[in-house]
């Protein structure tokens, strides 16, 4: 049975004191839930977050990592560095990494394989832009992103994969993605995985939705049969909003 997951992507927000305060508030208000709850502060606050949440069920995860184990990669972080401070899950392929830092499917394939080789869990992000949606290329774009980065993996690797669908066109564009559109894409992704691998893998992989989930729309989005939770951006930075989303699942 696939997991229900709510993950907060904090992006480049919150200094150490602000991180400690937000973590304290979230952990204090966390409801009793069977869902897996994750938070991803910035790199410089990951170790302290792990220590602070040592007695909590909340998992601390990383926003990115490099594919190399070590070397002359100024400013980068390796899988071993993350594991060394207690981080076992990493977000890869976020739309902002693709758009602002030139991360290609080929780079992401290397990152995914590097993380899996260290027995980490990968939260792999994918999704189409507005032009893709308007030209009806959204399914082919998503299929290509999945195929190029993930379909070369062994079937056994899928037990360590979480997927997160980000309709880039619905974030900051004035366009709105409906719960029905989220369900349509999630169902397509599950069918695509079933075709490439098998139905069991497709049925067991958690697929999160990352298109501006808020307390006001979370329950309706999460009620869709192929939506297994959310990768939360802005709402994750406000404790009451994030907790409301956790309760919605």
Image (cartoon, grey):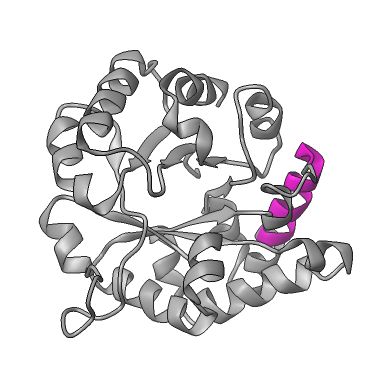
Residue 64 left/right relative to 197? left
The picture places residue 201, in percent across and down from the top left corner, at: 54, 61
The answer to whether 246 is drawn above or below residue 118 in the figure is above
Residue 135 in which image quadrant: bottom right
| Residue at image location 87% in from the left, 63% down from the top | 134
Image coords of residue 197 (percent x, y): 58, 72
Q: Position of residue 16 (x, y in %)?
A: 21, 37
61 or 154: which is nearer to us?
61
Kindly identify the residue that appears in the image at 15 percent across and 31 percent down: 52
What quarter of the picture does the C terminus occupy? top right
Horizontal side of residue 70 vs 117, given as left or right: left
- In the rendered structure, which segment of residues is drawn in magenta? 178-189
- Position of residue 57 relative to residue 122, above or below, is above
Q: Residue 88 appears at what percent x and percent y?
A: 25, 54
Residue at 70 percent across and 64 percent down: it is 128
Q: In the displayed structure, would residue 105 be above or below residue 41?
A: below
Q: Residue at x 50, y 44 (%)?
A: 2
Q: Nearer the viewer, residue 64 or 72?
A: 72
**Quadrant of the rendered structure where residue 107 is?**
bottom left
């Amino acid at each position: 049975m696939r997991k229900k997951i709510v993950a907060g992507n904090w992006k480049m927000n919150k200094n150490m004191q602000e991180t400690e305060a937000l973590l304290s508030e979230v952990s204090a208000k966390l409801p009793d839930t069977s869902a897996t709850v994750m938070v991803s502060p910035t790199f410089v606050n990951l170790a302290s977050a792990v220590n602070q949440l040592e007695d909590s069920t909340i998992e601390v995860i990383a926003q990115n990592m490099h594919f190399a184990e070590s070397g002359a990669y100024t400013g980068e972080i390796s899988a071993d560095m993350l594991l060394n401070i207690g981080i076992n899950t990493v977000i890869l392929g976020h739309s902002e990494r693709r758009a602002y830092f030139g991360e290609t499917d080929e780079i992401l394939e290397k990152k995914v394989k590097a993380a899996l080789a260290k027995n980490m869990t990968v939260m792999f992000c994918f999704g189409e832009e507005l032009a893709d949606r308007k030209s009806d290329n959204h399914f082919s774009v998503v299929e290509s992103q999945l195929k190029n980065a993930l379909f070369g993996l062994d079937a056994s690797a899928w037990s360590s994969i979480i997927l997160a669908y980000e309709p880039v066109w619905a974030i900051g564009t004035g366009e709105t993605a409906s719960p029905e559109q989220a369900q349509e894409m999630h169902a397509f992704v599950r069918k695509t995985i079933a075709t490439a691998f098998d139905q069991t893998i497709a049925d067991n992989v958690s697929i999160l939705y990352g298109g501006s989930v808020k307390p006001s729309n979370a329950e309706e989005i999460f009620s869709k049969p192929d939506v297994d939770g959310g990768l939360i951006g802005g709402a994750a930075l406000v404790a009451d909003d994030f907790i409301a989303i956790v309760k919605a699942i």
